[in-house]
Image (cartoon, rainbow, N blue to C red):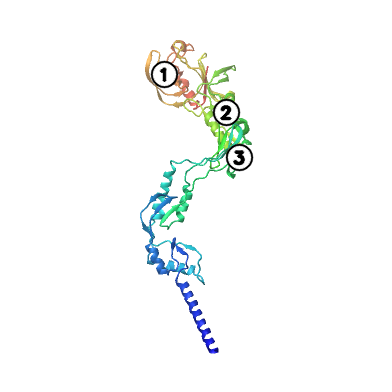
């Protein structure tokens, strides 16, 4: 009896040992039950069997959005070959457990012969298809914090039916090795009124209204308050503030009336000491109200504290304006040319000093060809030059001069006149020029040399 028990115990131990050895052998040579490689089930297979299955797996490359097929690509294989066996064997060891396990695990291997069709060509076509589908769909509308008529409001969000292409393509990537690719429809979601983004927008707008800019025009500084000049503002998706510049433009108009000199009267002190008023013509500057308002709106949006006027314009040879940097002598400064029609004489000043003076002959009076009065500026100088134009009795002339300095848009300037014999102070009444300031040969070089481009010319 005792011997019988010993035999039974020994047999049991042998069976258990054999079973244990079989389990260990199986665990070392086959994958656990719920193991997948590249989304293909390989449970219970050896590395060689798994490679064979993976090598023969066909990818249909059919792409579905919900139940709708949106693309049907060509069939492909994963691209596994015998060269991939070592990688599968490594996974076999990696997933191995002491006892059989039913735990699900997914592994991924990039096949050595993968043709990139799905990861590149198909991916590009699916993305293009989704974008094309979105063209006829309604986009969502985000809630926005805005400033309207000086009050803060939050516009409500509205749902749309456009697909979230970025999220769908992320889902596509996760199904890289599924035979059929099934994408769950995901729509672009609007930013809601309770979103932290909208709250941040409101905070930005509140901060905007607290801003002040010190705005310098020439030597004067104006304090511009956002709370007084900004009624409407919004914020873009990139948190950039867009400011309505209409009220800022009104402020620039006000400053223009106070400071600009274009087309305005200048108070001028003549060589004799008398004070006269002369209308600004080509000489002068003004602020481009529209462009400057946009610039200041941007400055408010960026939180700038000090800004200098940038958009200055004028007329004539230069459209950038003349005299903006000059604040002395009523805006004319101390370097200028003075032309007296009554006295038929000119005076050239540099930095307040008289550097040249001469008798001249101006435009013919009895035919209405008078040299135009006003404040002009030297547009350009040329030596020698050919003058072409017309005058009473000479409709088409062309004459060569040695020195030419134009100061009106109509072609009036200083020049020598070798053909002139009458230089009397009354010559202009009946024998004047076609409008130019004729200067004697003895004085023209000195006058020409002391005239500089853009300096004012005061004719009265």
Pointer 3 residue: 202
Pointer 1 residue: 418
> Does label 2 or label 3 sit earlier along the sequence?
3
* Nearer mark to the viewer, of 1 and 3: 3
Q: Report which quarter residue 196 is drawn in.
A: top right
Pointer 2 residue: 252
**Label 1, label 3: how many angstroms apart (C-alpha)?**
75 Å
Name the residue: 52% across, 84% down: 8
Q: Where is residue 94 in the image (x, y as percent from the top left)?
A: 49, 68
**Label 1, label 2: how many angstroms apart (C-alpha)?**
50 Å
Disc 2: CA contacts within 10 A as few (<14), some (14-19) or many (>=20)? some
**Residue at disc 2, secondary structure:** helix
Rendered position, 55 above or below 21 = above
Rendered position, 164 above or below 317 = below
Q: Is mark 1 in CB contact (under 8 Å) with mark 2?
A: no
Q: Position of residue 217 (x, y in %)?
A: 58, 30
**In the figure, is residue 223 to the left or right of 5?**
right
**Label 2, label 3: how many angstroms apart (C-alpha)?**
28 Å
- 400 or 151: nearer the eye? 151
Q: Is mark 2 in CB contact (under 8 Å) with mark 3?
A: no
**In the figure, is residue 197 to the left or right of 30?**
right
Q: Is mark 1 in CB contact (under 8 Å) with mark 3?
A: no
> Does label 1 or label 3 sit earlier along the sequence?
3
């Amino acid at each position: 009896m005792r011997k019988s028990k010993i035999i039974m115990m020994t047999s049991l131990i042998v069976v258990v040992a054999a079973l244990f050895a079989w389990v260990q052998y199986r665990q070392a040579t086959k994958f656990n039950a719920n193991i997948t490689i590249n989304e293909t089930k390989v449970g219970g297979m050896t590395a060689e069997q798994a490679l064979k299955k993976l090598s023969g797996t066909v990818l249909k490359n059919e792409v579905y959005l919900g139940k709708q097929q949106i693309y049907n690509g060509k069939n492909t294989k994963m691209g596994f070959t015998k060269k991939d066996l070592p990688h599968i064997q490594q996974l076999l060891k990696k997933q191995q457990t002491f006892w059989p396990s039913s735990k699900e695990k997914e592994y991924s291997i990039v096949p050595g012969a993968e043709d990139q069709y799905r990861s590149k060509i198909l991916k590009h076509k699916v993305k293009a298809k989704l974008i094309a589908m979105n063209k006829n769909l309604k986009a969502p509308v985000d809630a926005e914090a805005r400033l309207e008529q000086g009050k803060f409001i939050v516009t409500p969000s509205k749902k749309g039916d456009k697909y979230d292409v970025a999220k769908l393509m992320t889902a596509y990537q996760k199904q890289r090795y599924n035979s059929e690719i099934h994408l769950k429809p995901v729509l672009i979601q609007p930013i809601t009124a309770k979103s932290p983004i909208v709250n941040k927008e409101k905070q930005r707008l509140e901060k905007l209204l607290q801003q002040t800019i010190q705005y310098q025009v020439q030597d004067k500084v104006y304090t511009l308050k956002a709370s007084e000049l900004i009624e409407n503002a919004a914020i873009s998706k990139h948190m950039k503030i867009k400011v309505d510049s209409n009220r800022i433009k009104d402020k620039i108009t006000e400053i223009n009336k106070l400071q600009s000199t274009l087309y305005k009267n200048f108070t001028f002190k003549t060589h004799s000491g008398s004070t006269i008023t002369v209308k600004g013509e080509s000489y002068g500057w003004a602020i481009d109200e529209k462009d400057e308002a946009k610039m200041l709106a941007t400055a408010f949006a960026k939180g700038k504290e000090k800004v200098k006027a940038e958009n200055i314009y004028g007329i004539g040879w230069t459209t950038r304006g003349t005299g903006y940097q000059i604040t002395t002598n009523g805006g004319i400064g101390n370097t200028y040319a003075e032309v007296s029609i009554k006295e038929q004489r000119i005076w050239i000043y540099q930095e307040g000093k008289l550097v040249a003076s001469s008798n001249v002959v101006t435009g013919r009076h009895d035919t209405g060809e008078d040299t135009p009065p006003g404040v002009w500026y030297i547009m350009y100088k040329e030596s020698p030059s050919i003058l072409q134009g017309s005058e009473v009795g000479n409709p088409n002339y062309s004459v060569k001069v040695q020195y030419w300095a134009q100061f009106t848009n109509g072609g009036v300037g200083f020049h020598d006149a070798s053909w002139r014999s009458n230089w009397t102070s009354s010559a202009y009444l009946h024998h004047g020029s076609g409008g130019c300031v004729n200067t004697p040969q003895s004085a023209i070089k000195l006058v020409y040399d002391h005239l500089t481009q853009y300096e004012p010319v005061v004719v009265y």
